[in-house]
Amino acid sequence: MAGQTLYDKLWSQHLVKERDDGTALIYIDRQLLHEVTSPQAFEGLRLANRRPWRLDANLATPDHNVPTTVIERAEGNAGIKDPVSLIQVQTLDDNCESFGIEEFRINDARQGIVHVVGPEQGATLPGMTVVCGDSHTATHGAFAAIAHGIGTSEVEHVLATQCLLAQKMKNMQVRVEGTLGTGVTAKDIVLAIIGRIGTAGGTGYAIEFAGSAIRELSMEGRMTVCNMAIEAGARVGLIGVDDTTIDYLRERPFAPQGDQWEAAVAEWRELVSDADADFDKVVEIAAEDIEPQVSWGTSPEMVTGISGEVPDPAEAPDDTTKGSYSRALEYMGLAAKQKITDIRLDKVFIGSCTNSRIEDLRAAAKVAKGRKVADSIMLAMVVPGSGLVKRQAEAEGLDKIFTEAGFEWREPGCSMCLAMNADKLGAGEHCASTSNRNFEGRQGFGGRTHLVGPAMAAAAAIAGHFVDVRQFAAGNDSHHDTPSQEA
Amino acid sequence: MNKFVRQQGLVAPLDRANVDTDLIIPKQFLKSIKRTGFGVNLFDALRYMDEGYPGQDVSTRPLNPDFVLNQPRYEGASVLLTRRNFGCGSSREHAPWALEDFGFRVVIAPSFADIFYNNAFKNGILLVTLEEDVIERLFQEVEANEGYRLDVDLENQRVTTPSGEILEFDVDAFRKHCLLNGLDDIGITLQDEEAIREFEAKHRAARPWLFRETAKAATS
């Protein structure tokens, strides 16, 4: 008999009951809550006169709506100028208080984007099931946990029952073997994977990322990869446990200590796919083939390498794709065959649950150090993922590097990734963004998002257009040459 | 949740693949703490020429005349016909809330994104998956025939076209049961309360570090 995949092991460890119709009841160890997708769930509990099943399984923080300027944040919730946003954040505070759920409020140093906060606190542990009313919950799978986004009805279901009704997913393995080139990062790996399998390529699957290039990544890099599993259609992204996982978690506030730590580590070591495990699908990618990626369209699968060009819809494989490409080029204001390095930018956003951890900020700062943001860039902003990331970055002097280069240094939150607060793009503006979605209007009505890694975003801010960060890192910053084509 | 048994409805075609939930309901409308009232902002960026904001009187907003749902022939549609990977992206349940509030009870497509699939069924919306070539044919029939209606019968898992053609579809038994009876699945799960408690006790004994109270007690 074939061995088990990591996903299979985690599934069977949490299976409460399997129904005849194939639906299963799965036990949930951790639920992360934020202000946008929880109010209706708490309201549902109240209407049905129900209480949360287990308080200590939940952890909350406001992130989507919070302002990010220092001035606004100094006022706490009162600094939220949009009255509708304010009500939502206050509602989270009130619900957590009245139900007894632990919350890191707006100016708590531990506040931040839920997917940065959970791992940073050790609230995400190997062997867990983790859910949150946010599709980027896949992030936590980097710790060998089954972690995925759920809707608000399911948030209420988990609060009330500590379980989720689920159907077992199929297993996919994406193997990235070899060594990444200098300047090529986790973000480039995952964008290249999405470019290969498409935004529906992982639908119905849990994707396990494996191979030597994945093993070489830090936990921050692994989180970046798992975070975007959902952009490939897979609710779950996973990576097996190794020393990197365990070293990251040691001494985290929510992590076990003493004898329990030893017992936990012994069990966590088993959280890898067996060598003879059967996957329903295997995708292999050579690390050497991946160059820094830039998205050109309105879906994360519309992506190419920095040396590439915008595709010609006339060469699309089918009519539906052709229609999508044409619409994307029109929305993005790009021409077929336009070189990626000729795309001029208006704004740069470094942040989001994909790329706002300390390693991301270090990578961007390394590029920004001693250089200046191009005059043509209206706004270049760096938004750390949590108060603790911000504190760490400031201790390392990264904030100074950014501000001296002309970047704005902000307070933690989701910010311009989805523009629910005041940080947004204007119509027609092109943005180099380290976030995860380039959908129409995602970063603001009519805004044009290009997804990149943090070093690429910083390099684009300096140059005013996309450049190959690999040349930049070598000091060959030919940012004075003007793009030949107006975007 | 509303029951869904059978729907004979006017069909509106949305000829676009990978319709994401940001497009179904843009983020500025997610600030509401209610479950209702999202219908006027369904497909907001496609439907109106200007940028919308929550709580706005939409009656004075300029409509995009090219958008399918603004065309008089599709007024009152309750069946949405669309392309592959509908509902991709964000987990926002506001997407099915907006579709339902607008009046859609059925969405027919070649494929749906996973999280949206779950969310729709929890809100009384039936998602029907049909082969890509069948969808293509339905698009042609809808466009050629004004007032084109489909009869969607969940009990028998079939869609009947105006010409009497029968298209069968799959749906899992549990979702079907909940939809036919309009059942709240929290209530159903709580019937297994004892099994959950039993599982939890074993889980806690085997992995006390997953329970903060136990973990604290052990280290303090």
Image (cartoon, rainbow, N blue to C red):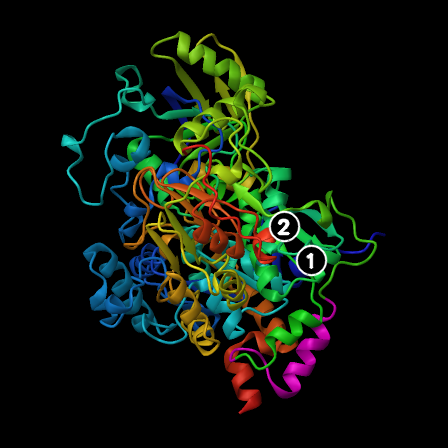
Chain under disc 1: A
| Residue B41 relative to residue A370: left or right | left
Residue A390 numbered tag: none
Dividing the picture into quadrants, the one containing residue A421 is bottom left
Q: Main secondary structure of the magenta part?
A: helix
- Image location of residue B149, percent across then percent down: 39, 16
The residue positioned 46% from the left and 34% from the top of the image is A484
Q: Which residue is mark 1?
A: A214
Element marked by disc 1: helix
The residue positioned 78% from the left and 49% from the top of the image is A278
In the image shown, does A289 or B170 lie closer to the viewer?
Answer: A289
Tell me if label 2 and label 1 are in contact, CB under 8 Å: yes
Q: Earlier in the sequence, mark 2 or mark 1?
A: 2
Dividing the picture into quadrants, the one containing residue A34 is bottom left
Specify whether residue B47 is in view.
yes
In the image shown, does A458 or B11 lie closer to the viewer?
Answer: A458
Q: Crowdedness of circle 1 by 10 Å Cα count: few (<14), some, many (20+)? A: many
Is residue B138 rendered magenta in the image?
no
- Image location of residue A388, percent across then percent down: 44, 74
Rendered position, A458 above or below A294: below
The magenta-colored residue range is A253-270
